[in-house]
Amino acid sequence: MFKSIRFMMGYVWKVRKRYVIYQLIYQILTAAIPLSDIVIPKFIIDELTGAQSVPNIVGWILLLVSVNLVGSVLSAYLKRKCFILKGEVFTEFQTMMAEKLSSCDFERLEDPRFLDVRAKAERFLFADGQGFAAVLDKAFNVVGKLLSFIGIVAVISTLNFWVLLIFAALILINAYYGARVRKQTIQWDLEKA
């Protein structure tokens, strides 16, 4: 699978470098916006409980709003550009495949091994019907999620141990009661039927 992703990445880099660059920037932005939503309010709260300087509070709030606004606009723009560039890469790929098929030995086109390899390649390229290069998009999404995870772990590591313990306890209590409510709801639904 990684060999296939490498091939796809190499091909896309050769045909449309901007697609790879835009995807990377898009993933960094989608990781940075939630992190700013976690970090900047901490500074606002610190300012509210500390010096209570109105200009500093307004500055932090404006920074938070600006990061969200600019980040969202840039994310939407990059997502749109990536969609268009992916269509261009698809067209280039289809043209390249047509040229290769037209210049190959026609006897081999009906060979079962060739047809098997072709079917496997199409399943990868179209991700079993999810669209062209969906696997490459998923690989970029993994990078973005990894960046978000690293950022959140960095933020959590700065918290006090007792605060983390309280959050863990609240999560467990929420999961416990959520499961009980779901179980009761299912039981009521079964009684109605």
Image (tube, helix red, strand yellow):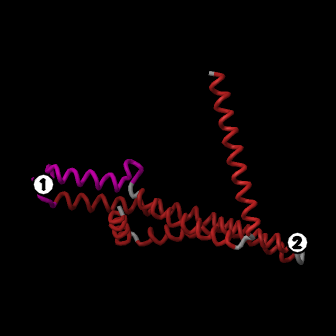
Q: Quadrant of residue 125?
A: bottom left
Q: CA distance from mark 1 to mark 2?
A: 75 Å
Q: How many marks?
A: 2
Q: Position of residue 91 (x, y in %)?
A: 34, 59
Q: Position of residue 172 (x, y in %)?
A: 69, 52
Q: Residues within 10 Å of mark 2 (few under 14, many from 20)?
A: few
Instruction: Work out whether mark 1 precedes mark 2 in sequence or the reverse, and give the earlier one.
Output: 2
For the residue pair 77 and 30, the one nearer the viewer reads as 30
Vertical side of 130 occupied by 146: above or below: below
Q: Secondary structure at mark 2?
A: helix
Q: Is residue 106 magenta?
A: yes
Q: Main secondary structure of the magenta part?
A: helix
Q: Residue at x 73, y 69 (%)?
A: 161
Q: Which residue is mark 1?
A: 108
Q: Is residue 41 magenta?
A: no
> In the rendered image, which quarter contains the N terminus?
bottom left
For the magenta stretch, what is the residue range?
103-131
Vertical side of 185 occupied by 2: above or below: below
Q: Quadrant of residue 62?
A: bottom right
Q: Position of residue 90 (x, y in %)?
A: 36, 59
Q: Secondary structure at mark 1?
A: helix
Q: Residue at x 14, y 51 (%)?
A: 111
Seen in the image, is 70 located left or right of residue 49?
Answer: left
Q: Residues within 10 Å of mark 1 (few under 14, many from 20)?
A: few
Q: Amino acid at mark 1?
A: Arg
Q: Position of residue 116 (x, y in %)?
A: 22, 51
For the residue pair 39 and 106, the one nearer the viewer reads as 39
Q: Which residue is mark 2?
A: 49
Instruction: Kindly give the residue lying farthest to the left in the view shown.
Output: 107
